[in-house]
Structure formats: C-alpha cells, structure tokens
Image (cartoon, grey):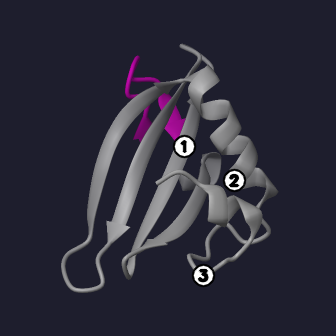
Amino acid sequence: MVSCAKCGADLGGHENSDQISVEVIGDEHTYAYWFCTSCDVYTRKIFIDRFLGLEYTLGPTWIKRQECDKLVEMIRRCPDPGSKRCKCETHRQFPI
C-alpha cells in the first residue's frame, strides 16, 4: 500500500497507479504515479533496478496535479508501459 506523500491518505497498491518503465544506461527505472483525491496531488515513486547492483526506490514525493497530468496522459497512451524496450512516442519523449 502507498500513502499520499502530502496528506498520508491510503492510495492503494500498484494496481491504482500509472507506471512506465524506461531504460537508463542499462538500468530499468519505473516511474509510478498515484493520484490523491483528498489533496489533489500525485505521489511519485521511482523504482530503480540496476544492471550491476542493488535495486532501490526513490520517494515518495508529491507533485502538483497540473505538473503531472500530462505525464500520466502520456503513460496511458503507451501500448506497453511496462516494457523498458518499447519504442513508442511516449517512451521516446518521457522526461527522465
């Protein structure tokens, strides 16, 4: 379960998030975003699976809705957001 990084509300598990995996110099970075209806912000966690090393997580951090709505919209347009090797427009343009 994930809690909102701003107000602490329960946001559920990964099934309630929008996620995209991207490749960064051989490592897999998965960006996960949960929307909090209580305080109108997104909570983001970044899961990093290092090619040569340990896995770790950055966050949670909260992001203003107006800054994150476009990212979530991009993720939802991707045909395979869980694949770091996807070559769609979203993956090519996703800001790392």
Tell me where residue 10 appears, x and y as whole percent: 48, 31
Read off the residue under disc 3.
Answer: 85
Read off the residue under disc 2.
Answer: 75
State the SS at label 3: loop
Instruction: Identify whether 92 is placed above or below 27.
Output: above
Which residue is most to the bottom? Answer: 52
Task: State the image quarter where residue 38 is shown.
Answer: top right
Q: Residues within 10 Å of mark 1 (few under 14, many from 20)?
A: many
Residues at circles 1 and 2 in contact by the CB criterion of under 8 Å: yes
Q: Residue at x 60, y 23 (%)?
A: 65
State the SS at label 1: strand
Q: Which residues are magenta?
A: 1-12
Amino acid type at image mark 1: Tyr
Amino acid type at image mark 3: Arg
In the rendered view, does 45 fall on the left or right side of 53?
A: right
Mark closest to the chain's N terminus, 1 or 2 = 1
Q: Is residue 92 visible?
A: yes
In the rendered view, does 78 fall on the left or right side of 72?
A: right
Q: Residues within 10 Å of mark 2 (few under 14, many from 20)?
A: many
Which residue is most to the front? Answer: 93
Does the segment drawn in magenta span residue 46? no
Does the segment drawn in magenta span residue 10? yes
How far apart are labels 3 and 2 at the CA level? Answer: 14 Å
Tell me where residue 47 appears, x and y as whole percent: 38, 60
Read off the residue under disc 1.
Answer: 33
Find residue 80 and name its label.
Answer: none
Q: Residue at x 70, y 76 (%)?
A: 87
Q: Nearer the viewer, residue 26 or 31?
A: 26
Q: Nearer the viewer, residue 78 or 14?
A: 78
Instruction: Identify whether 12 is placed above or below 25.
Output: above
Q: Nearer the viewer, residue 89 or 2?
A: 89
Instruction: Identify whether 53 is placed above or below 81.
Output: below
